[in-house]
Image (spheres, rainbow, N blue to C red):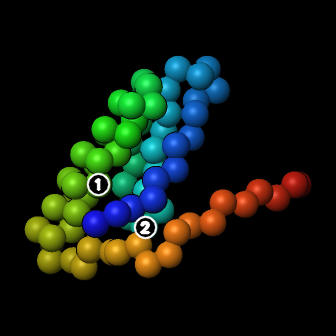
Amino acid sequence: MRYTIILQPWDDEKGYTVIVPALPGCVTQGSTKAEALANAKEAILCHIEGLKKAGETVPEETSEPELASVRV
């Protein structure tokens, strides 16, 4: 399975928060981009395992999220 992730750099540029839009609540982080990507894969696998154990449906990403911004 393939999931889109969002890498949000920290203000101090010393790490990233990772969000998986197709899996609400699946969030991780890493001190480097490589670590964040590795942690994202592990978080996704653990999240899916938890959903299966709970008897819940594992969401599949049917379309890629669209990134946009608004000025306020």
For residue 44, the mark is: 1
Q: Is residue 53 left or right of residue 42?
A: left
The disc at residue 22 is 2
Point 88% across, 54% down: residue: 72
Image height of 35 relative to 50, above or below = above
Q: Residue 20: where, in percent of width, then height? A: 43, 57
Q: CA distance from mark 2 to mark 1?
A: 10 Å
| Residue farthest right in this picture | 72
Dot placed on the residue nearer the N-terminal end, 2 or 1? 2
Between 25 and 58, the residue placed more toward the observer is 58
- Amino acid type, residue under disc 1 in the picture: Ile
Image label count: 2
Residue at x 22%, y 55% (from the top left corner): 45
Q: Position of residue 63 (x, y in %)?
A: 50, 75
- What residue lies at 61% left-to-right and 20% top-to-bottom? 12
User: What secondary structure is marked by label 1?
Assistant: helix
Q: Are marks 2 and 1 in contact (CB under 8 Å)?
A: no
Is disc 2 placed on a helix, strand or loop?
A: loop
Foreground pick, 27 / 4: 4
Residue 62 sits in quarter: bottom left
- Quarter where residue 3 is shown: bottom left
Where does residue 46 sit, x and y in percent of width and height? 20, 53
Q: Judge whether 48 appears above or below 58 on screen.
A: above
> What's the mark number on residue 16?
none
Task: Name the residue located 33 percent from the left edge and 75 percent from the top edge.
Answer: 59
> Hey, what amino acid is under mark 2?
Ala
